[in-house]
Image (cartoon, rainbow, N blue to C red):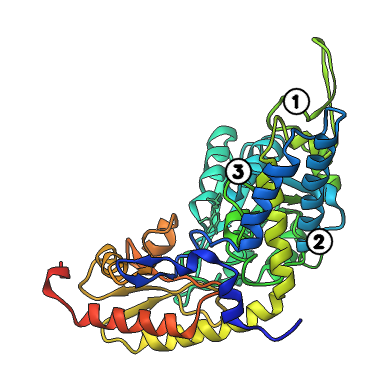
Amino acid sequence: HPAFDVHAVRRDFPILEERVHGRPLVWLDNAATTQKPQAVIDRLAYFYRHENSNIHRGAHELAARATDAYEAARDKAARFLHAASSDEIVFVRGASEAINLVAQSWGRRHIGKDDEIVITWLEHHANIVPWQQLCLEVGARLRVAPVDDLGRVMLDEYEKLLGPRTRLVAFSQVSNALGTVTPAREMIEIAHRYGARVLVDGAQAVSHLRVDVQTLDSDWYVFSGHKVFGPTGIGVLYGKLDLLNTMPPWQGGGNMIRDVSFEQTLYQPAPARFEAGTGNIADAVGLGAALDYLERIGLENVSRYEHELLLHATRGLAGIPGLRIIGTAPDKAGVISFVLEGIRSEAVGEALNREGIAVRSGHHCAQPILRRFGVESTVRPSLALYNTREEIDALVVAVRRIGEGSSVLRY
Ligand code: PMP
């Protein structure tokens, strides 16, 4: 790959030229969703202009084009995750739907009364609630691996939770609330020693670091397209092929069947058996274009660049009086969470917005981990490959001013 040039990258994202309240937009809400490069926007338009059709049926030219484009996107997702086969890639709406699919399909069949599911304190609600619902339904128990004061999963405590009743471990590779990178490879290896299956929530990982599901050896891996520069409404469930093929279908309908009579239905193998009805064809194709884009830039380049940027942001923010960073693990990606003493996080977010700086403030759909650190909400700037040191400096200056701040912002 050629050297990483952030200014060239920025030219690929037309929305970065927007102005907000008369200021250049500073988009630091990438953990919520990422912006889209022109290549993705163009690919969506191209699909609707030249290829639009339903797929997998209809023997005509546009059906063939749409099917080819959709299946090519599946191949790109397989290569992106280094899956062994494209059949291991199921298109879903996003990470949330992928987790619910596994909980409802595999979970209902393999998790029973008094069985245990292990998650961590770091989890997004999307990786808590579906398991809680399943536990209620089947009489299983949810157990939660604690994190230390830096926001790292405590591995020895995690292992103590595992036992003969553990059927499943589910955890995020990168925390959306603190930015902690979990030792996924090690956690999976430990879980497998206890005979548990493992689902990795990669929603916050895929835009920041190279993922290889075969090296990880995760049984499932999920992510959302919109957090990796692709469209909303499309995401990926990766699963090991033999595992996917033993999972019962989740939703029934067209496309997922081999044969239907009123007496019985025979299902397709994976991935088709999990793609009932007309899927989000155009956005899958758009996601393929996003993954191509990221491959062209090179995830190694992205990781290296963002690592420096995160250090720069951490140093800058940490120097502000009254500012407390929540989550100070040595291994982090993309996210900084902080609170400013005496000022509501929402007020900080609003004040930043008036300067054109977009961050999220709130609980980030991860209430338990924030409460673990004694707060109900934080301010969360989050990075992507198109952010610059100048933008970080603007953020730091603005937060410092807010901290010194106007009394109207005080509690
Ligand atoms: N897991 C994590 C770690 C996330 O950050 C998110 C999105 N904030 C999700 C799951 C859910 O993703 P989606 O809303 O796209 O389904």
- Under circle 2, the secondary element is helix
Q: Position of residue 340 (x, y in %)?
A: 28, 75
Using the numbered discs, state the Cα–Cα distance from disc 1 to disc 2 in whole angstroms. 27 Å
The quadrant of the rendered image in which ligand 1 is seen is bottom right
- Under circle 1, the secondary element is loop
Q: 184 left or right of 368?
A: right
Marked residue nearer the N-terminal end (1 or 3): 3
Q: Amino acid at mark 3?
A: Glu
Mark 3 Cα shell of 10 Å, populated few (<14), some (14-19), many (≥20) = many
State which quadrant residue 62 falls in: top right
Using the numbered discs, state the Cα–Cα distance from disc 3 to disc 2 in whole angstroms. 22 Å
Outermost top residue: 262
Q: Amino acid at mark 1?
A: Gly
Disc 3 within 8 angstroms of ligand 1 (CB): yes
Q: Position of residue 111 (x, y in %)?
A: 67, 40
Q: Position of residue 197 (x, y in %)?
A: 73, 52
Front residue of this view, candidates 354 and 324: 354
Q: On the image, numbered disc 3 is attached to which residue?
A: 97
Q: Position of residue 144 (x, y in %)?
A: 53, 57
Marked residue nearer the N-terminal end (3 or 2): 2
State which quadrant residue 93 falls in: top right
Q: On the image, numbered disc 1 is attached to which residue?
A: 254
Outermost front residue: 49
Quadrant showing the C terminus: bottom left
Using the numbered discs, state the Cα–Cα distance from disc 1 to disc 3 in whole angstroms. 19 Å
Mark 2 Cα shell of 10 Å, populated few (<14), some (14-19), many (≥20) = some
Q: On the image, numbered disc 2 is attached to which residue?
A: 79
Marked residue nearer the N-terminal end (1 or 2): 2
Mark 1 Cα shell of 10 Å, populated few (<14), some (14-19), many (≥20) = some
